[in-house]
Image (cartoon, coloured by chain):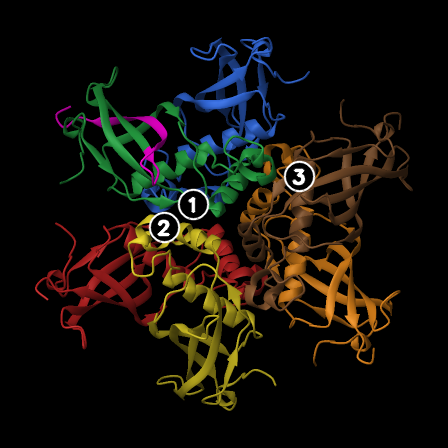
Chain colours: A blue, B green, C brown, D orange, E red, F yellow
Amino acid sequence: MNPPEFFEDFEIGASRLTPARTITEADIVFHAGHSGDFMPHHTDAEFCKSQPFEKIIAHGTMTFAIAIGLTVSSQPLNPNGMSYGYNKIRYPRPVFAGDTIKVKVSVLSKEDHPKQLDHGIVVEAKEVINQNGEVVMYAEHLIIVKKRNG
Amino acid sequence: MNPPEFFEDFEIGASRLTPARTITEADIVFHAGHSGDFMPHHTDAEFCKSQPFEKIIAHGTMTFAIAIGLTVSSQPLNPNGMSYGYNKIRYPRPVFAGDTIKVKVSVLSKEDHPKQLDHGIVVEAKEVINQNGEVVMYAEHLIIVKKRNG
Amino acid sequence: MNPPEFFEDFEIGASRLTPARTITEADIVFHAGHSGDFMPHHTDAEFCKSQPFEKIIAHGTMTFAIAIGLTVSSQPLNPNGMSYGYNKIRYPRPVFAGDTIKVKVSVLSKEDHPKQLDHGIVVEAKEVINQNGEVVMYAEHLIIVKKRNG
Amino acid sequence: MNPPEFFEDFEIGASRLTPARTITEADIVFHAGHSGDFMPHHTDAEFCKSQPFEKIIAHGTMTFAIAIGLTVSSQPLNPNGMSYGYNKIRYPRPVFAGDTIKVKVSVLSKEDHPKQLDHGIVVEAKEVINQNGEVVMYAEHLIIVKKRNG
Amino acid sequence: MNPPEFFEDFEIGASRLTPARTITEADIVFHAGHSGDFMPHHTDAEFCKSQPFEKIIAHGTMTFAIAIGLTVSSQPLNPNGMSYGYNKIRYPRPVFAGDTIKVKVSVLSKEDHPKQLDHGIVVEAKEVINQNGEVVMYAEHLIIVKKRNG
Amino acid sequence: MNPPEFFEDFEIGASRLTPARTITEADIVFHAGHSGDFMPHHTDAEFCKSQPFEKIIAHGTMTFAIAIGLTVSSQPLNPNGMSYGYNKIRYPRPVFAGDTIKVKVSVLSKEDHPKQLDHGIVVEAKEVINQNGEVVMYAEHLIIVKKRNG
């Protein structure tokens, strides 16, 4: 089955699952340096011992970046789509080094673009799921997609 | 002036500006590898010549991660606050290698937490601004903050 | 068209082209550190001024690694194939920072596996091609592939 | 004893052993990102549990790059030699995070260069050996070397 | 309390403690590649088994760099100060992956600048302390600071 | 000529020059993240325009780490020597992206170890020199070395 290309091809409720990736200590160290976010929750194991989870947790911004990476690398580039932004990013559970995450991408809703008649806006839900089947991140991704008959 | 610590300390409209950071080609290359997002807009200079901006653009997820990095590293950790998620992330303009970005953090709104009486939810607007004063990213950050007299 | 899955599906002469990736100064710096190969051809711009190409050239081992990365990331994983090794890696031209490379993957030959009756060996030619259409690396990749009716 | 410099100095059967290097989880994570090769054998620990080795294995391209790094960094640069390519790269055993590898470099054969009378071709065998003395990679490296009396 | 700004503001004996950071295997691997220092004490776990500490130790240059990073990132930039150099760097104990270090910064001494009448030289002691309270690095940092009434 | 091995082998005034390495923008970006030192002199090109050198300068801690890397990687490990610390690190000139540095290592002085009769202390001067022959860093390295007849 080909991935959807035009606005008309996106079916509400359709979903796919990306490959998975194991998050490592190295990823967290690398992300701290790359983002400049050295919050003790991510870089100070002694501090974390006093916290509810008792160990270092991954940056939310890293889970987000890797989730998008998993999503875009597992499907051919759609030349008719353009990322417009995100709504409602939530982190219901932490991600730890050693967790393996994948992304369930579902078409949540679609509507006409308010200004561009030949485009629509597709909202994809991106649920990041760990090896225990728990959702660790949720995001709604807005994509502007060309209409086939626009 | 001390940074706000309790829910009551956040004043709607108050704002601060973070230090700035220059985004480099190396950052984009690192981020592609770290996130696994090798979309041609970020890694293929020849493809980009055919695109509206004619050159490689930074990943939105990187701008987001670095913006949060600038935000958290420029103020002491608030032990009474906990990031809850984001609403409405938008990317009105691209970021290119060589651009220098900083973040304007403003208190947008605050409300009681629906379930935890002793906490409130503060919404901070995070505007990422380039060296020309243009907004390149906008995000609304939800923070759960303890009430002083909660 | 689905990618070949079983030995029988590989057609001699069939070929595909991967997406492209721009090699940057950062890649060469990163690879020097990661591999530990700090030969002056890759890390000493002053030395290079005295050499035929007059500038820093990419490591052959990096071109190889990125070529394989482009190859495996642009097609679904074939659960019936297993990389066995390479023959005849050549570097007819140098790669410089700023070059954009892609890989042409062609089925060069196929033969029965000498010991495993239910498998065959497929040899894929991997030609790494720069933005000028020049071949900068050539490799023959040996893949052991399950037979459908093996 | 000085390392060989001219074609005449290479003695068939002569060998040397490089220093060793421990391959870490961080190396595999870096290499996945740098090469863009996120095959589940290298990045998905859950997938690997179902595979023969039951854990993540290092990329063959990384073992190759690090082996060459160990080789070139443990001997002075020979200004009279130029890498021409490789023949017959094989991976008889996997490399895991925690393994410590070194390279045995041996002169396998030498012959006149077919076109350049004042140069010869030296073939060096590069055997990558782990901490248990097992060969994990084998490569034949072709080096074009100036003749002293060419 | 504001951090000292002018030469006159530095009080001998005053001290502060930075946030802490856990040193990881990934940090040591990064630093080896970044610095090019692949001494077996830092990269060869088998060699280290024969050494007094029996495991890989962090590079002294990395402990130094991270200590300075912790120091500068935990206080606003002082526009009136300029780093002049260091005296007497010592490493009384090794740092291992898993250790969590922080820096105690103390004003050790201050004197007039020999040539610039409107500046003085402040010497800060930087003691890097691990999770057991042991000093693992000691450095004396020379800072040229403007006088308020210079 | 073999490198000195025992205390007696070090001759005051003897010197050697390491290979050179070009410092890149990527190195500075990488070092900022690795060390956590995001001072604007190293990461904010707009800020730097207002400073005396008008462009980003390399971290002193990076020049130090790379200088030591060049030093140790260009000579076999001396099993009889142990780094004890440094005295008097100075940075007379800045290092910029694009500069190529090498290290002149000279034996500055030697003396008996105050407590260990069978060891001495050798002080090596390490001068980091850029492509214009200017000294950009100076350090005195203290090495405890076994005596041959100790």
Task: Give the residue type at disc 3.
Answer: Leu
Characterize the local packing of mark 1: few (<14), some (14-19) or many (20 or more) Cα atoms within 10 angstroms: some
User: Mark 2 is on which residue type?
Assistant: Ala
User: Label for residue C70?
Assistant: 3
B9 shown above or below D11: above
Could you tell me residue B54's position as x and y percent?
53, 36
Viewer-closest of D107 and D92 = D107
* CB contact under 8 Å: marks 3 and 2: no
Residue at mark 2 to residue at mark 1: CA–CA distance: 8 Å
Q: Which residue lies under the disc numbered 2?
A: F45
Query: How far is the residue under mark 3 from the one under mark 2?
Result: 33 Å
Q: Nearer the viewer, residue E108 or F138?
A: F138
Q: Indicate whether residue D45 is drawn in magenta.
A: no
- Is residue A8 at least partly visible in the picture? yes
**Label pair 2/1, CB-CB below 8 angstroms:** yes
Mark 3 and mark 1: Cα distance apart in space: 27 Å
Residue at 66%, 71% (x, y): give it. Answer: D77
Query: Which segment is the magenta one?
Result: B128-150
Residue corresponding to mark 1:
B98
The N terminus of chain C is located in which quarter? top right
Q: Residues within 10 Å of mark 3 (few under 14, many from 20)?
A: many
Q: Mark 1 is on which residue type?
A: Gly
**The C terminus of chain C lies in which quarter of the figure?**
top right
Chain of the residue under the numbered disc 3 shown in the image: C
Residue A60: x %, y % from top left: 40, 32
Label 2, secondary structure: give it: helix
Q: Secondary structure at mark 1?
A: loop
Is residue B145 highlighted in magenta? yes
Residue occupying the point 66% across, 52% down: C95
Q: Does B118 sit left or right of A133 as displayed?
A: left
